[in-house]
Image (cartoon, grey):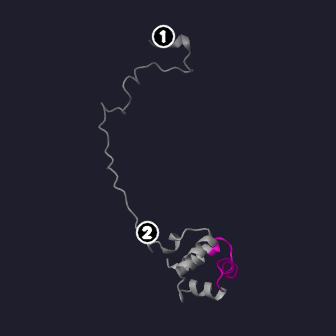
Amino acid sequence: MTIGERIKQARKIRGMSQRELAKRVEVSAQAISKYEREINAPSSGVLLRLSKALGVGVEFFVRPKSVVAITPDYRKRRALPPENGRRPSSPGFDDRPRLGRMAGPSDVQRLK
C-alpha cells in the first residue's frame, strides 16, 4: 500500500471526511485529496500531524509495502506401531476394572 492509500484507509476507519482531517492537520482539504491520490507527498511535519489526528503511529504510513509470509516447518506425523493389534494405551490403564459408577472410598481399597 502507498502512503496515500494508508491515509485514506485510516481516515475512513476513523469515519472522517477529508475536510475534517484537513482541519485537524491544519492543511487544506485539497492537500489531503492530493496526498490520497499520490499527486503530492506529505512533508514529515504533516505526516506527524496526520498520525496524531488519525491515532496511528508514523510507521503506519511508511512501513514496507508487502508482508512476507513465513511458512513454518512442521514435523511429519508418524503412525505409531500397533501393539498386538490393539490400540495404544497408557501403561496399566486397561488392567483396571471398569466400574459402572464413580469410584468411592470403598472402591479404592478394592482396586489396590
Instruction: Give the mark nearest the N terminus, 2 or 1.
Output: 2
Q: Foreground residue, 70 or 32?
A: 32
Please give the name of the residue rendered at 47% of the width and 71% of the height, measured from the top-left corner.
63
Quadrant position of residue 10:
bottom right
| Whether residue 36 is situated above or below residue 65 in the rendered picture | below
Please give the name of the residue rendered at 60% of the width and 75% of the height, measured from the top-left corner.
49
Q: Amino acid at mark 2?
A: Val
Magenta-colored span: 11-27
- Residue at which label 1 appears: 110
Q: Foreground residue, 79 or 76?
A: 76
**Pointer 2 local density, CA inside 10 Å: few below 14, some 14–19, many at least 20:** few
Magenta-colored stretch includes residue 48: no
Helix, strand or loop for disc 1: helix
Please give the name of the residue rendered at 40% of the width and 65% of the height, measured from the top-left corner.
69
**Pointer 1 local density, CA inside 10 Å: few below 14, some 14–19, many at least 20:** few
Badge nearest the viewer, 2 or 1: 2
Q: Seen in the image, is 8 located left or right of residue 23?
A: left
Viewport quadrant of the C terminus: top left
Q: Position of residue 27 (x, y in %)?
A: 64, 84
Quadrant position of residue 88:
top left
Please give the name of the residue rendered at 36% of the width and 25% of the height, measured from the top-left corner.
91
- Residue at which label 2 appears: 67
Q: Position of residue 89 (x, y in %)?
A: 38, 30
Q: Position of residue 102 (x, y in %)?
A: 56, 21
